[in-house]
Image (cartoon, grey):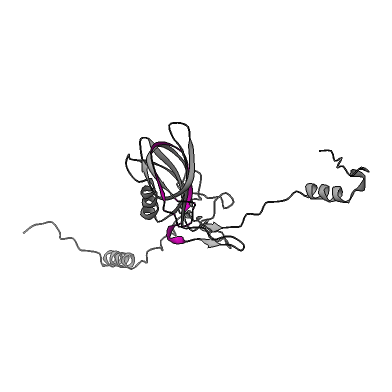
Amino acid sequence: MSNNPTPIANSDSVSSDDHHIGSSSQRTPPPPLPPPPPPPPTASTNQHVTNPSSSKPRGRPIGSKNKPKPIPLPVPLPTEPSVKVVVVTVDPNRDIMECILDIAHQDHVSLSIVSAIGMINSVTLRNSTHGAPSLVLHGPFKLLSLTGSYLYRNEYTLHLGATPPRPLSFGINFSASNGEIFTGIIAARVVAGEGVSLTVSTFKSPDILKYAAESKEGDDNNSDNDNNNPNDLTEGGDDQRSI
């Protein structure tokens, strides 16, 4: 057996220690502190500051309307001229009158001869004697002029006082080698020679008007004054008018 005495615990100290431990385990923790306030915005932050006075309003202003679009002007269509002038070359030994009628029938137009040059081999003229046969003259002749008109299908507008024209009427002037000049109305064929060229004016639906020559008022007044003025006659009755 050991001679060391066994320690005996103090009941008071044990109980006090136990009481201290129990009180510490039941203590309530203090409440958490509130978070600190956020710092105020400064120029160094990335926030975009806008000035309401300098910013442009977006969208269309109140009361605005679309601008009216300009109306495009209509493009005028090309119109065919009412009168055309053509130059026609007639082959030798061909009938000039047949060539003229071919132009009118192919283009459905009326026409007038402006000028004609060249040589002709023969021509048939109307006889001035009533009931007499036509005259056929053989050349060669030099063609001086060819005049007349042809109205296609006899289409025209006749105004008051005008005389209806003939649908086909042509006159001709030509000269022989000896210088003799012939004039007449074409009755049938005119056979072309060398170098025959025609200048023809074509048109559609012509107006036929009556031509009235305008009289000068001064001439009429002078004639009236001359007839009524007795001082123009001498005692012997001779006319002493000065021109």
Residue for point 54% across, 61% down: 164
**Residue 66 drawn at (x, y percent):** 53, 59
Residue for point 49% across, 43% down: 183
Vertical position of residue 63 compared to residue 211: above or below: below
Of the pair 14 and 112, the residue shown nearer to us? 112
**Magenta part of the chain:** 126-154
Task: Locate the N terminus by quadrant.
Answer: bottom left
Residue 90: name its quadrant: top left
**Residue 28 drawn at (x, y percent):** 37, 66
Vertical position of residue 126 compared to residue 8: above or below: above
Residue 194: name its quadrant: top left
Of the pair 92 and 136, the residue shown nearer to us? 136
Residue 158: name its quadrant: bottom right
Q: Does the rendering let one see residue 184? A: yes
**How many discs appear?**
0
Task: Locate the C terminus by quadrant.
Answer: top right
Does residue 133 appear to the left or right of 54 in the view shown?
Answer: left
